[in-house]
Image: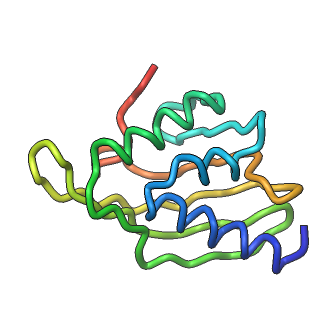
Amino acid sequence: MSEEEILLLAEKLKKAFEDRDIDAITNLYSDDVVVWHNYDQIERTRKQALESAKWVVDEMSEFKIEDCNIFLISGGYIQQCVFRGVYKENKGAMETYAMIRIYCSDGKVDRVEDYSDPAQGAVPDLH
């Protein structure tokens, strides 16, 4: 993928999460996407990753990806950002600082490596 295509994919993925658009996220993930988190070392399948995305849609309001910096690297990009939102159930604020390594090809996300601290409010364990 060209640098322009990678930047466009990064923009589309960010927008899909902020718009709470599960169909768009589904379309941006490759069929064999893997999502890994540093805090548990588990590689999640596409189905599990989409369940996590759906949890964000169902349980969070006002979800935003802010202070977002994209750094192009070979085969993808690194996104340094802050996830912010409000838990629907208790109206509590969520703020999670993250650095995410995205591998991509053919216009799709192939692998996500999420470096964040779940104690800050990351997506819960769904397995």
- Look at 61% across and 54% down and name the residue there: 24
Quarter placement of the N terminus: bottom right
Front in this rendered view, residue 29 or 72: 29
Q: How is the image coloured?
A: rainbow
Above or below, comparing residue 64 to residue 120 in the picture = below
- Look at 50% across and 76% down and name the residue there: 68
Front in this rendered view, residue 8 or 124: 8
- Look at 70% across and 52% down and name the residue there: 28
The residue at the far left in this view is 90
In percent of width and height, residue 95 lies at: 28, 61
Residue 98 in the figure: left or right of residue 35: left
The picture quadrant where one finds residue 83 is: bottom left
Residue 63 in the figure: left or right of residue 109: left
The picture quadrant where one finds residue 70 is: bottom right
In percent of width and height, residue 29 lies at: 70, 46
Front in this rendered view, residue 37 or 85: 85
Residue 108 in the figure: left or right of residue 10: right
- Look at 38% across and 46% down and name the residue there: 56
The residue at the far top in this view is 127
